[in-house]
Amino acid sequence: MEAKQQEPITSEASQLNLSIEERLRHAYTKDGSLDFHGKPAIKDRTGGWRCGTLLLVNQGLANLAFAGVEVNMVLFAKSVLRQTNAEASNTFSRWMGSLYLSSLMGAFLSDSYLGRYLTCVTFQAFSIIGLLGLSFATQSFLLRPHGCGKIGQLCDPHSPAETAIFYISIYLFALGIGAPEPALATFGADQFDEEDPKEKKSKTSFYSYFYIALNLGCLFSETVLVYAENMGYWVLGFWICAGCDILAFSSLLSGTLRYRHFKPSGNPLSRFSQVIVASLRKINLEMPTNGGGLFEVHVREYEANGTRRILHTNDFKFLDRAAIMTSADITTNEDQNPNQWRLCTVTQVEEVKCVLRLLPVWLCTILSSMAYIQMLSLFVEQGAAMNTGVSNFQIPPASMTAFDIVSTTAFILLYDKLIVPLYLKVAKRRPKTPSELQRVGIGLAIATVAMIIAGIVEQRRLKYASFGGEETSSLSIFWQTPQYVLLGVSEAFVYVAQMEFFASQIPNGLKSLGIALSMSSTAIGTYVCSMILSVVMVLTTKNGKPGWVPPNLNDGHLDRFFFLSATVTAMNLGVFVVCARRYKSISLQKQEGESAAGVQ
């Protein structure tokens, strides 16, 4: 009798245990993310938009500080450091290039050793030190005599030591802003579980909101701060930037206990080298057909580290030799891992293939930044030589970038809700939105048009210019509005799609490197732009000619340089289309036993 009464109780207990196990299973994230203590992350207690919002606030405030220095760097170089137009443009381009190149270093440390959170914390501290140094230097000795630094009012020459302090400060700031940015973008996306349909959608949206936060942070700097700096209030502007940078750092730290993390995956250079060495060691072996018999570990080993197995592809077949198992690779101890300098997994080989496939597309994105870097240098110089007056108010030339920011932000916000549905209705096709590469191509085409318009505006500016030695023109600065708006729309297409593309086409353990590749293309583009400008000045200043971009723009032909930029961008677009058509997407094996997915 007692035994019969015990059966239902036992059954209920087992059902209760199963129910608890089921709830616990659903309580944890499925993508392998960890909490602050290194344990599996619980969904309700970690990540999500609570943490994502903190990181967006951090991005917005940090970029407010960055834009406060960036937007008037050319004017500061001309008015305070007494540089010419070409020298100031090159100073700005090199500084921006260093900022973006530092993103590669930050991404490497983030994915390999430090992790994304620690990378952000460490380098954002450098940005604060750099800004404090710039603020102290400007207040103490850069602005001499008192009241200098306004448009047309040059400061006294500075000693080499004073100039060196300025450069050390701005390059420390560039390191602190550039290095953590790819890690921050990826860290924000890490707060959403891609194996959860609802959170996966949020993860995709995060990159768009990340770029919006970047632009909104710049908006205040490029309207309010730029006006104060144009009036000579450099000290006030830089101290406001330093305060915002400290607030951004506080926002990052405030979510420390709630963030989701992924373990660093080790040195990618070492893993890539292992594939090359292992394939060369087996160069005489016959290749298996369709990747049959190649070495791979169980999928659970990848899931334990929050990564996924990459399926075999048939391109770059010579690398597949690294995954061919020979008798020399077999170990007697089952617990002992094979020597990775002799035998690599298919996934490790495919990681190298992914990067190799990305290189042609990445090279094409380098010249795409040529138009955007000019918006922050030559567009500002062009605006400074125009009529900036509206009634009794003088518009700071750099504040015209507000049209770029507003158009970029508006376009991103309206893209999914208005522009895509309208496109599908007009095109009368099945619901298939443009891919990331298609969006980049559209953006490059718009950038080409923007540079042509900039050249036409410059021709018109010269028509109304005064040639009595002053760098002025009666043409209103608002004639620049179309080129800024078009470049803003182009940015919305190119940069967001570029970020999404590189993040999706790179293995899980190298996500920060993928974002850094996207950013580093802009960095190298700034150096290329600076080099092209330097070559143009050398060629056009022969026989005593003033050149295309002289100290007084009224004596030159800035319009020709804009048309040259449009030509280069158009040629780059043609090469990009060829590379995009030939590109093959990464193919990942889904977790939890689902079928493979090709990421488009």
Image (tube, grey):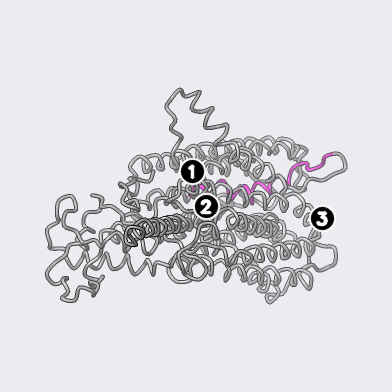
Q: What residue sits 82% from the left and 55% below the top?
A: 231
Question: As rendered, which of 539 and 58 lies closer to the eye?
Answer: 58
Q: Is residue 324 above or below residue 163?
A: above
Number of residues whose C-alpha sits closer than 10 Å to that of mark 2, classed few (under 14), some (14–19) or many (20 or more) = some
Q: Which residue has dot 1 on it?
A: 568
Q: What is the x, y in percent for residue 237? A: 76, 60
Instruction: Find the distance from the CA under tag 2 to the CA under tag 1.
Output: 11 Å
Q: Which residue is mark 2?
A: 532
Quadrant in which the N terminus appears = bottom left
Task: Of the two numbered discs 2 and 3 on the same chain, state the one appearing first in sequence.
Answer: 3
Q: Mark 1: which secondary structure?
A: helix
- Amino acid type at mark 2: Ile
Q: Where residue 388 sits: x, y (%)? A: 78, 43
Query: In this orientation, does residue 424 appear?
Result: yes
Is residue 531 among the parts visible in the rendering? no
Q: Residue at x 46, y 68 (%)?
A: 39
Q: Which is closer to the viewer, label 2 or label 3?
A: 3
On residue 231, the disc is: 3
- The question of residue 377 being in magenta is answered with yes
What crowding class fits label 3: few (fewer than 14 Cα within 10 Å), some (14-19), or many (20 or more)?
A: some
- Mark closest to the chain's N terminus, 2 or 1: 2
Q: Are marks 2 and 1 in contact (CB under 8 Å)?
A: yes
- Gap in Å between the C-alphas at discs 2 and 3? 32 Å
Over which residues does the magenta segment extend? 367-390
Quadrant, the C terminus: top left
Counting labels gives: 3
Say above or below: 259 vs 354.
below
User: What amino acid is at disc 3?
Assistant: Met
